[in-house]
Image (cartoon, coloured by chain):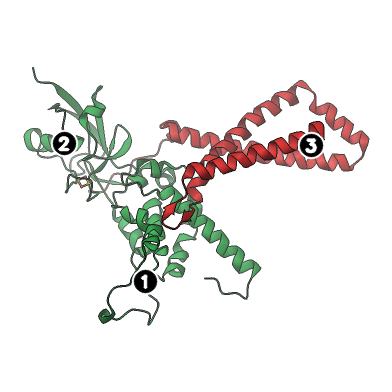
Amino acid sequence: MQETVQLEIFRYRPDQESEPTFQTYEVPFREDWVVLDAINYIKEQIDGTLSYRWSCRMGVCGSCGMMVNGVPKLTCAVFLRDYHEGKIRVEPLSGFPVERDLVSVVDDFINKLKDIKAWIIREEGQEQPVEEGEYLQTPAELAQYKQYSMCINCMLCYAACPVYAQDSTFIGPAAIALGQRYNMDSRDQGRDQRQEIIASHEGIWECTFVGECTTVCPKDVDPAAAIQRAKVSSTIDWFKEVLVPWGKRK
Amino acid sequence: MSPYHRPVPKTWWLKRRAYFLFMIRELTSVFAAAYCAFLLVFIYKLGEGAQAYASMIDLMQSPSSIVLHCVTLTFVLYHTITWFNLTPKIMVLRVGEERVPPLVIAGTIYAGWIVLSLAIAWIVLGG
Ligand code: FES
């Protein structure tokens, strides 16, 4: 007899129900299947009405994040065999409103990326003409921010953050880590602009350093460290302003 | 057709081990702060003369005070160790392209802690 595994899936169909429910599906167990494969099997073979997001199936696009047994995971990167004991419970990423089934509403995060200006900013008139080629960088300069640039915007860190769950005005781990990513880039000159958001009430000072964002990050970005480092540099800014009011901070 | 907002249960911090350990860490800071306040009072009493100091020492030798001290010590140790372990995350030191290994940073802090503790013990007990 073929071995099977049960998936208990969060269902929410706003056109039919006002409260979510759980629906259990039985799928074949395969040694080499990830949780996303099982969900795809349900969609294709059992119940075409199930909604969820995915794209690359290789841990790159960051769209398949869901809660697997209560922990935020990229469902294309966790194997069924790792959960083989009992049922596997799959829910949409926590901390976000649910659009439908496993699909969460992520507009808030997208807006935060805009707020934090997650791109290279050059000061007025500092833009290098195209003919001069690219901005050069040494390997040591690259090493400063490389880790933060690995972020794939999967939002697992938001789903792990109890602060964000209580108060979604918090800018949150990935956006702050990405702010740091550009702040530490030798080609960037936008730190002061970002600082308005990073050092604001909704920024780094909301973070209480639970550290779970770092634990769940599939790309070892370590957003918790990024936030704490931003706290240190903001504090240094503050001291500089207070102690050396005539010196323009850099 | 509106999105569904899942409520956050009051017991969220019991749902995951890491959340629980975090809450304990937050709680221990109360003990650390309270003990600092206590030390200030202690120094103040010292300034008030021998008698006030002696009565303070008496008070500290009571069983309830000893129990309270043991509890505080445990919490302050937890607080210290968790923060020491987190320090290498905050302090990212680089030598050229290489990052100084977190263990080296943590090790230095622990070593500093031991040396300072020994120095204080030496002053208090022997010196
Ligand atoms: S499907 Fe792209 S990261 Fe999982």
Numbered disc in front, either 3 or 2: 3
Amino acid, disc 3: Ile
Relative to A108, does residue A119 appear above or below in the rendering? below
Supply the letter of whichever chain is red: B
Residue at 64% x, 70% y is: A244
The image shows residue A25 at horizontal and vertical percentages of: 16, 28
Q: Which residue is mark 1?
A: A121
User: Alpha carbon of mark 2 to alpha carbon of mark 1: how far?
Assistant: 41 Å
Q: Based on the displayed image, in which of its 4 quarters is residue A82 positioned?
A: top left
What subunit carries mark 2?
A
Q: Is residue A108 left or right of residue A245?
A: left
Numbered disc in front, either 2 or 1: 1
Say whether mark 2 and mark 3 are on the same chain.
no
The image shows residue A31 at horizontal and vertical percentages of: 16, 28
* Residues under numbered marks 3 and 1 in contact, where contact means CB atoms less than 8 Å apart: no
Specify the label residue B123 is tagged with.
3
The image shows residue A37 at horizontal and vertical percentages of: 15, 36
Q: Secondary structure at mark 2?
A: helix
User: Alpha carbon of mark 3 to alpha carbon of mark 1: how far?
Assistant: 56 Å
